[in-house]
Amino acid sequence: MTKFNKTLLAAAVALASTQTFAAGFQLNSQSATGLGRAMAGDAIIADNASVLARNPAAMALFDEKALSIGATYADVNVEVTDAQFLGQDLGSIDNAAEGKFIPNAYYINPVNEQFAFGFAAFSNFGTGADLTPLTEVEGTISPVDLLGNTEVATINLNASMSYRINDALSLGLGIDLIQGSGKLSRGSLVEVEADGWAVGGIVGLAYEINENHRLGLSYRISPEMQASGDIMYLGTEFEDINIPLADIAQLAGYHQLTEKFAIHYTAQWSQWSSFDSITLENPSSPEQILKDYHWKDSWFLSLGATYDINDRWTVRAGIASDKGVVDEQSSLSIPDSDRIWYSAGFSYNFSEKSSIDFGYTLVVGEKVHVEEKNAILLPIDAYTESGANYFSIQYNYTF
């Protein structure tokens, strides 16, 4: 069976007190340019090769080979306060997450006026949190099946092509090979360590109204995944774990209003309502539901602007609303909330061929009250608040 760390990531979310800082467990941090404008218009602006992460059809807008290489540092802050279990105070955690570096690289090669192809490496998913301090308060009993340590990372390797139909319309499609690795521990109850690969895909279109106005649309397909690995739960080893993942659609627009000033926007929809339950399988036993969830679809809406100061300097800014996925059934294992993004960035052009981008985003999440019952239906409740500072740098070259 295919092994897939996206699946392991979902398993970690299902089994653990995992904190993330975007809806579900998505990472909207594929480029420094995008982070400088809250990812607004990223599926159609095509100011460098990083557009490949959002819309393969936008490669048709390039008439030269393009290369972009960058990295983002995600300084994630997760606070857990007033944790209570059986009338006991389990304490608080100032920061349950660690900062992570998220690299990326993109290459676009136009073959002729109609056809282009490209390759990319970036991350769409990742999370990590350590809530074991809540199990270590002297003189208390804690729900160890809900508290522990989780580390997960994924890398998306993409190959795409685009084809220009006419002066206005271009189409694109791509295939994603996703490699991931992760660890999960919950005392002696849960131990998971696995890595693997799986296949996904993306389709897109780019529509050029005229030279100053264009629209982009893309759809990323995320089928249900079945993974194999070292999976132990409540003393039983399992061979396979099944996770439904969200498809992602986005609409983006770009409008050059003056010679120096442009606005752009994105509406991203994620089908998190498909994330209904996590199941485990063994060949000799029936499927077991590990945990049920009742998530809702989410929206990420962003608006940004770009201003060319001169031939050397470009500045950009953006704001975004990131809706959480948790519906009526709250859970300490998924303490999601609505978040606001505040972004700013700039580019410096060394020449007509090369440039460097810097981007910064502050993610501010709401403080939420979370209650969850453990395996024997005893509730733990706490307040959680999560956010992040993104710092990103990227080098771009055309040739």
Image (tube, grey):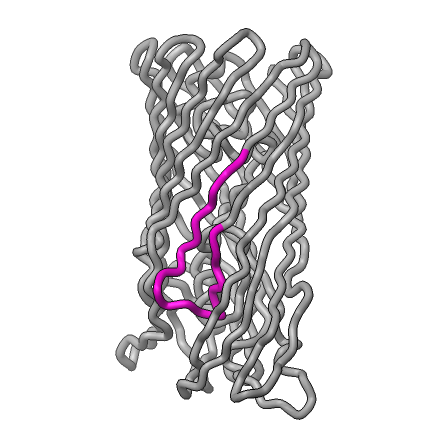
Instruction: Decide if residue 315 is on the left or right side of residue 153.
Output: right
Q: Residue furthest right?
A: 350
Q: Considering only vertical position in the picture, is 357 above or below 289?
A: above
Q: Considering only vertical position in the picture, is 145 above or below 45?
A: below
On whether residue 326 falls in the magenta region, the answer is: yes
Query: Which percent across, then down, holds residue 259?
Result: 55, 7
| Magenta stretch in the rendered image | 319-338
Number of numbered callouts drawn: 0
Which is more toward the observer, 73 or 88?
88
Instruction: Decide if residue 102 is on the left or right side of residue 28.
Output: right
Which is more toward the observer, 357 or 353?
357
**Magenta stretch, overall SS:** loop
Query: Which percent across, then down, holds residue 205?
Result: 34, 25
On whether residue 94 falls in the magenta region, the answer is: no
Q: Quadrant of the C terminus?
A: top right
At a point 63% along the width and 76% down the height, the residue shown is 132
At a point 62% along the width and 81% down the height, the residue shown is 90
Query: Which percent across, then down, holds residue 391?
Result: 68, 40
Query: Which percent across, then down, holds residue 29?
Result: 56, 41
